[in-house]
Image (cartoon, rainbow, N blue to C red):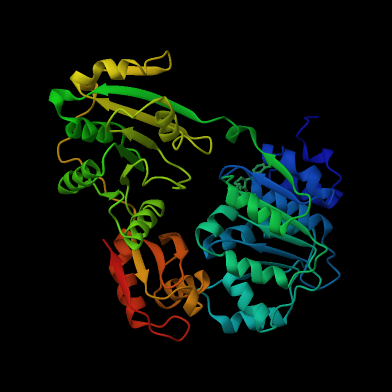
Amino acid sequence: MNTTDFSLLPLSAEMLSNLNEIGYTQMTPVQAQTLPLILDGKDVIAQAKTGSGKTAAFGIGLLHKLQVKKFRVQSLILCPTRELADQVAKELRVLARFAHNIKILTLCGGAAFGPQLGSLRHGAHIIVGTPGRILKHLDKKTLSLEDLDTLVFDEADRMLDMGFIEEIDKVLEYTPKERQTLLFSATYTDEITAISNRVQKDAISVKTVSTEVANKITERFYEAQDGNKLETLVNILSSYTPENVIVFTNTKLEAKEIAEQLQKRKIDALAIHGDLEQYERNDVLVQFANKSCPVLIATDVAARGLDIKELAMVVNYDIPHGEETYTHRIGRTGRAGKEGLAMTLYNTYEIQNALEYKNESRLFEDSSTLKKVNGFEMRPFFVTLVIEGGKKDKVRAGDLLGALTGDAGLSGSSIGKIDIYERQSYVAIERSLIDEAHQKLSKGKIKGKKFSVWILQ
Ligand code: ADP
Ligand code: MG
């Protein structure tokens, strides 16, 4: 018998035989690490990458303790989008085949409310849904969580990205204090720890091995070809095609200039520097963080406090003033177990300065090895829509998501990060759908009110 056989767990014979039937014989690492704790009733916070089998980890746990004869909602799984909720429900239905009559219901925004009422009236054991719609049912008393035993946050990082924090807090008020709370996330950030502290008790943290590796950063130095740093930068971008990149400059004038030059070459770049008004700075940071702009040009001061979770590349357009600044800058890439790239440019006359940085892990490369791609462009996946309504107007992520997926007919997967500020909200929308979303949202209403909406470019 293998040490990761499901049969090692204290599961019922029916459950084990069903797992066998659906072809689950061995536990995946995240299942092997969390299931013993989950079955023991512990609160668990687990980090594991996509496709690692997180659904079955919590699914087997909550199904194991489900009292089928008690026809009350005993488990609630919160998901960021309707598509993900549907996937989870589908997997749970397969896992639930060991018993008859386990009712699993999805409640998501973007779907009609009426039929959900009908289904709820018939009762359910397990609810899977998005925070906004769940809250709506709770507020209307069409859903009760009085008998809830297990609360699951699936893809918690995405839920936070999508701005669901307030809805989550309100949903929590409807749940019993005595409950098991499980939190799953692909990335592990301070925000995730903060939410865990709020919603869980003595949570045991599990990280699967594959994501445990420390920051891995490849550091390369390039002498600018023919004294042309911009050209060398473009060649670096076209050679490595990073998803996102921060280019550091030593002066704000240079930051502005590089952004302009790159824009002329159809490489979407924005600059942040000390001359920007607070709102302009915010517009830029939001667009970079929500993947509406792949290249950010920044001075050290302006980049302070910037929290970008997964940065593919950092470029030092100029040699930084000292090792400390260098380390600080490049430390922003290679997070969450992904490999990062740190590139430093220097001019021929700066070679002495550059060589001071030389050590065995830093590679000095010949920039003629970089690929030159004619007409190379960098366009973002998303474009940002601004809605002139925010917290002050009681606009919540769920309302925006509802308006976009419901009336405007977009799918949850075409919507990215949602940021809600006091008087404004930002939503990242798939580029090809931006005009449609803009039109529909301008014509329609959010929370029964009209708001002006524009595209940030
Ligand atoms: P995650 O939520 O971590 O991204 P999923 O829970 O969606 O991953 O699982 C990914 C795939 O692996 C699904 O198709 C699921 O059916 C399958 N799977 C999960 N656990 C096992 C297992 N123990 N053995 C075989 N396949 C599994
Ligand atoms: Mg999942």
Where residue 221 appears, as percent x and y from the top left, is 31, 22
* Residue under the point 59% across and 33% down: 210
Q: Nearer the viewer, residue 196 or 42?
A: 196
> Which residue is outermost to the top?
360
Q: Where 361 falls versus 435 (above or below)?
A: above
Where residue 339 appears, as percent x and y from the top left, is 46, 31
Residue 66 position by quadrant: bottom right
> Which residue is outermost to the left?
226
Q: Nearer the viewer, residue 258 or 241?
A: 258
- Check the picture and name the quadrant holding the N terminus: top right
Q: Is 446 on the left or on the right of 262, as rendered?
A: right
Q: Is 395 on the left or on the right of 261, as rendered?
A: right
Q: Nearer the viewer, residue 95 or 427?
A: 427
Q: Nearer the viewer, residue 340 or 314?
A: 314
* Residue under the point 29% across and 56% down: 276
Where residue 238 appears, as percent x and y from the top left, is 25, 35
- Check the picture and name the quadrant holding the C terminus: bottom left
* Residue under the point 26% across and 40% down: 251
Where residue 136 appears, as percent x and y from the top left, is 61, 78
